[in-house]
Image: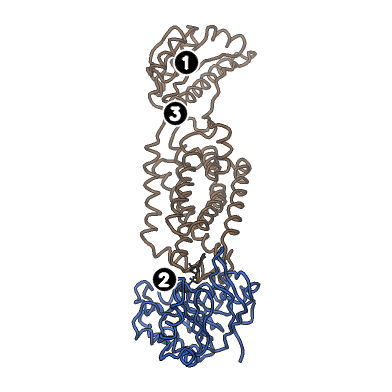
């Protein structure tokens, strides 16, 4: 334990002495956090919609008014057939096509169900997809409205309009609310995996590791001494990110901070394990840099920061399951947006723990004191 | 005489390459043992095996009474090592380096403070206690590294080319430190490329291409090879070497 104390003292001294590194570790993420959500803003504005109203009823009119009233959608026009509507989508004159079928009102009244068809322009995919989900939200609202009207009518069952709604936990589609937690994860990821790897490899390059190896320090103590400072740094960085997200984007986590920080520690355990593993395979900082960039790029591209993991092919999803950030991003989003507790995210936490155990065990076995 | 290092046919292979071939020698307690050889002769490799940093391929060896195959952790408690590559932390100050190494060898906090003061006085570094090691001249770094490597009062200290790249006066001062340590009973196992330093040793072994070609006191070696100085002895042996790093 005393050994660990002296190791930690040394690590923190070295860390605090490297002002430029510290500055970079804090300022670079801050800038990214400020810029990235702005650049990656896909919030729903001016989604153009073409409508095929085959019903021409008062309800269909009401629905259309409701859709165009909000400002998110602008009416690209009315056409008489679904085919024409699709053509407009194809020609990029509209992002979405909405078809209200004949007898929409009657079915709503008689069978308590209505069907709507929505076609989405896949070229402007993100915008239209978000528009699509937002549209679903409006339809659901509409549904609720008439339900309330009808239930005044005592005996009648409330009707159901079927359009899958997916963004219920972010009803205003505030994209920042969605992006900030994920970007925060990518920042913590880069810092923890890369810096811990660099730090250990630096001792190899300088030759000081030889000196450490000839002392009676136990290798797990040495490793713990290396990882704790980065754990602390990761927590500081994360906190800073939360504060910035709150100040700039008004992102206030719905869920508890205990859940957030508990998950963060588990996550850092896994990512520092990765850094350690990288360091055991690198003789120079350059090698460590290439290896960590490789992983961090893949993580950023595939873990669902910008694109949805659910829309990947099954094999890719299986691979992404082994990426700790994909789990932590899900955790962050659900905890920040929905306020999930430990029981809701336990699957992800268990996954990260398992990955972390594998990475750390592998790293320790590979980190040979007697090289 | 008590033997603190004993080796018998100690061998290290890297693949097909035999870096150290059946080394057999003993080192007495309190001795200054010079370990000479041309570049690539296998000195560092032998030293790393004795320090428990490298597993030997075959043979036997004990250091401070402990086996190099099975008791490397015990060996580490009883030796100091100054590697060929520089071994202090550049971004820590002089006293922080001393404190760190004293600390990880389990020295009590109170003792660390007195020991630090003692070392600084001995090295004449009182005014440099708060200087970053990176700002010290090489000669001072080497002296500091040596003092740090014996901060925990080990039985044996291994020095791998401790005086490379500094002027003769500074080297002479370094050897004063070595003598001082030897006087206190520390066994010194040292490699060097400087033949004047070889003269300072009690006994000298000369390695050629992974084998020990000669081992005796400098006086006897000079007699044996009919040479005026160690330089000549070394030259007669080392020019037969086929292996060289440069
Ligand atoms: N890990 C290794 N793998 C393969 N070969 C090695 C390894 N370590 C050392 N060698 C080789 O073993 C030989 C002896 O190396 P060693 O470092 O022991 O020489 P040395 O006597 O210390 O030389 P120098 O005076 O240059 O320090 C060299 O040819 C070296 O290339
Ligand atoms: Mg060497």
**Mark number for residue A190?**
none
**Mark number for residue A126?**
3
Question: Chain ID for label 3?
Answer: A
> In the rendered image, which quarter is residue B127 located in?
bottom left
What residue do we see at 44% from left, 62% from top? Answer: A202
Q: Secondary structure at mark 1?
A: strand
Q: Which residue is nearer to you in this view: A228 or B194? A: B194
Quarter of the figure that contains the N terminus of chain B: bottom right
Question: Chain ID for label 2?
Answer: B
Q: Secondary structure at mark 2?
A: loop
Q: Are marks 1 and 2 in contact (CB under 8 Å)?
A: no
Dot 2 surroundings within 10 Å: few (below 14), some, or many (20 or more)? many
Q: Give the colour of chain A.
A: brown
Q: Which residue is nearer to you in this view: A163 or B53? A: B53
Q: Which residue is mark 1?
A: A98
Q: Which residue is mark 2?
A: B92
């Amino acid at each position: 334990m005393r050994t660990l104390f002296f190791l930690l003292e040394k690590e923190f001294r070295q860390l605090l002495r490297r002002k430029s590194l510290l500055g970079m570790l804090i300022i670079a993420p801050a800038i990214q956090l400020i810029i990235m959500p702005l650049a990656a803003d896909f919030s729903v504005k001016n989604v153009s919609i073409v409508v095929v109203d085959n019903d021409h009823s008062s309800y269909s009119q009401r629905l259309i008014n409701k859709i165009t009233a909000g400002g998110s959608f602008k009416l690209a026009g009315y056409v008489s057939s679904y085919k024409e509507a699709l053509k407009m989508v194809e020609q990029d004159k509209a992002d979405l096509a909405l078809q209200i079928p004949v007898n929409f009102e009657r079915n709503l009244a008689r069978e308590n169900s209505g069907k709507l068809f929505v076609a989405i322009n896949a070229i402007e995919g993100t915008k239209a997809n978000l528009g699509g989900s937002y549209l679903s939200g409006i339809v659901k609202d509409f549904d609720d409205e008439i339900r309330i009207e009808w239930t005044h009518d005592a005996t009648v069952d409330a009707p159901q309009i079927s359009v899958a709604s997916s963004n219920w936990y972010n009803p205003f589609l505030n994209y920042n609310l969605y992006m900030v937690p994920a970007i925060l994860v990518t920042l913590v990821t880069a810092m923890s995996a890369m810096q811990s790897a660099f730090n250990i490899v630096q001792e190899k390059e300088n030759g000081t590791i030889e000196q450490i190896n000839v002392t009676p320090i136990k290798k797990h103590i040495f490793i713990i001494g290396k990882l704790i400072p980065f754990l602390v740094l990761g927590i500081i960085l994360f906190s800073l990110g939360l504060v910035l997200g709150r100040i700039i984007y008004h992102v206030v986590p719905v869920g508890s901070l205990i859940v957030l920080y508990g998950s963060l520690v588990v996550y850092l355990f896994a990512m520092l394990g990765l850094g350690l593993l990288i360091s055991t395979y690198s003789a120079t900082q350059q090698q460590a840099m290439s290896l960590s960039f490789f992983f961090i790029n893949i993580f950023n591209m595939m873990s669902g920061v910008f694109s949805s993991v659910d829309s990947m092919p099954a094999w890719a999803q299986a691979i992404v399951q082994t990426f700790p950030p994909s789990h932590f991003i899900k955790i962050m989003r659900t905890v920040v947006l929905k306020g999930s507790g430990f029981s809701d995210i336990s699957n992800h936490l268990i996954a990260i723990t398992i990955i972390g155990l594998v990475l750390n065990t592998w790293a320790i076995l590979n980190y040979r004191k007697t090289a | 005489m008590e033997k603190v290092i004993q080796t018998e046919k100690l061998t290290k292979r890297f693949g097909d390459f035999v870096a150290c071939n059946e080394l057999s020698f003993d080192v007495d307690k309190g001795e200054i043992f010079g370990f000479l050889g041309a570049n690539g002769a296998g000195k560092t490799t032998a030293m790393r095996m004795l320090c428990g940093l490298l597993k030997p391929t075959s043979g036997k060896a004990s250091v401070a009474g402990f086996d190099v195959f099975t008791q490397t952790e015990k060996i580490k408690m009883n030796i100091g090592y100054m590697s060929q590559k520089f071994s202090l932390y550049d971004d820590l100050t002089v006293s922080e380096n001393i404190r760190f190494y004293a600390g990880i060898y389990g020295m009590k906090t109170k003792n660390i403070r007195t020991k630090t003061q003692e070392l600084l006085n001995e090295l004449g570094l009182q005014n440099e206690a708060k200087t970053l090691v990176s700002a010290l001249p090489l000669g001072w770094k080497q002296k500091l590294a040596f003092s740090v490597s014996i901060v925990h009062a080990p039985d044996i200290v291994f020095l791998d080319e401790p005086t490379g790249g500094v002027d003769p006066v500074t080297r002479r001062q370094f050897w004063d430190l070595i003598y001082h340590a030897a006087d206190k009973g520390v066994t010194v196992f040292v490699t060097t490329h400087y033949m004047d330093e070889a003269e300072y040793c009690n006994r000298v072994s000369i390695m050629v291409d992974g084998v020990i070609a000669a081992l005796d006191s400098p006086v006897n070696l000079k007699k044996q090879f009919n040479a005026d100085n160690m330089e000549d002895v070394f030259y007669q042996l080392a020019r037969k070497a086929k292996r060289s790093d440069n």
